[in-house]
Image: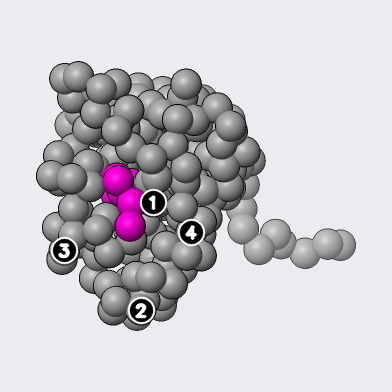
Amino acid sequence: MFGKPLISSKVLFTFIFVFVSSIIFSQETEKINGSYWGNTEGAKKTFVVLNLKEKLAKHKKIAILPIKSYIRYKKTPKDYNAELNKEKENKMSFELQTSMYDYLIVSKDNYSVQIQNIDSTNFILKENKMIDSITQYKPQDVAKVLGVDAVIFSNYTYTKLGSEFGAIVSELLIGGGKVASGQLNMDIINGFDGEVLWGFGKTMNQDNLSSPEAIIRRMMSKVERNFPYLK
């Protein structure tokens, strides 16, 4: 009456079994290779120079530079476009700079330094034709051009690990539903001599119910809580 089903239950079961097995095998392989993408997020890493408080006490104003961003894929999509990806990375650099500034400026009264408005920072960098090539200059030279005592150099890597469908299946079957990760590395560099005074590193995960923006918000919240200029 209803005719034959398009896919037999046996074929469907075989497909599901192969798909699930491939996920489990992939994750087990990553465990063996020491790069298991589990639910455990990386612990924060902090670098502190000797006599940090004494050196930070000399600072009156600092600047947050555009955050160099990278968008990576564990498996390159078939429709990957390098030029479009580059545009997204450039856009993300300024979005992250804004996000870091917004999070830090909320607690400005609790800091021992003034944070230069990022609109002023970027305007000066553009005027001096440095906005697109900041890493080619010495940090102390950038600080001098901006008129600040220290600069915050950072980079951020967003890595897409898999599809949302795969993450949901993985979550249901083996308890690991991560679809992406974000890694931030941040340095406060002395504008007088280019010395790295303080460094912060953190990796966070994005599951199938989260978003890239959620990672950034959580990341910047961590930065705000660990900022060394707190009084």
Going from N to C along the chain, the mark reached first, 2 or 4, is 4
Secondary structure under tag 3 reads loop
| Residue 7 percent coordinates (x, y) | 62, 58
Q: Give the SS element for disc 2.
A: helix
- Dot 1 or dot 4, earlier in sequence: 1
Using the numbered discs, state the Cα–Cα distance from disc 4 to disc 3 in whole angstroms.
Answer: 19 Å
Q: Is residue 130 left or right of residue 109?
A: left
* First reached walking from the N terminus: tag 4 or tag 3: 4
**Which residue appears at 27% of the width and 40% of the height?**
187
Q: Which residue is mark 3?
A: 137
Q: Amino acid at mark 2?
A: Glu
Above or below, 11 against 38 in this view is below
Spatial separation of the CA atoms under disc 1 and disc 3: 15 Å
Q: Amino acid at mark 1?
A: Ala
Image location of residue 19, percent across then percent down: 45, 45
Residue bearing mark 2: 127
Q: Quadrant of residue 182?
A: top left
**Residue designated by label 4:** 118
Q: Residue at x 38, y 59 (%)?
A: 66
Task: Say which of marks 3 and 2 sits in front.
Answer: 2
Q: CA distance from mark 3 to mark 2?
A: 15 Å
Residue 142 vertical placement versus 32 (above, below): below
Q: Earlier in the sequence, mark 3 or mark 2?
A: 2
Labels 1 and 3 touching (C-beta < 8 A): no
- Looking at the image, which residue is at 47% across and 42% down? 114
The three-letter code of the residue at mark 4 reads: Ile
151 falls in the magenta region: yes
In which quadrant of the rendered image does the N terminus lie?
A: bottom right
The amino acid type, in three-letter code, at marker 3 is Tyr
Work out how far the residue at label 2 is from the one at label 4, CA to CA, in angstroms. Answer: 14 Å
Residue 163 or residue 227, whichever sits in front? 227
Q: Which mark is residue 63?
A: 1
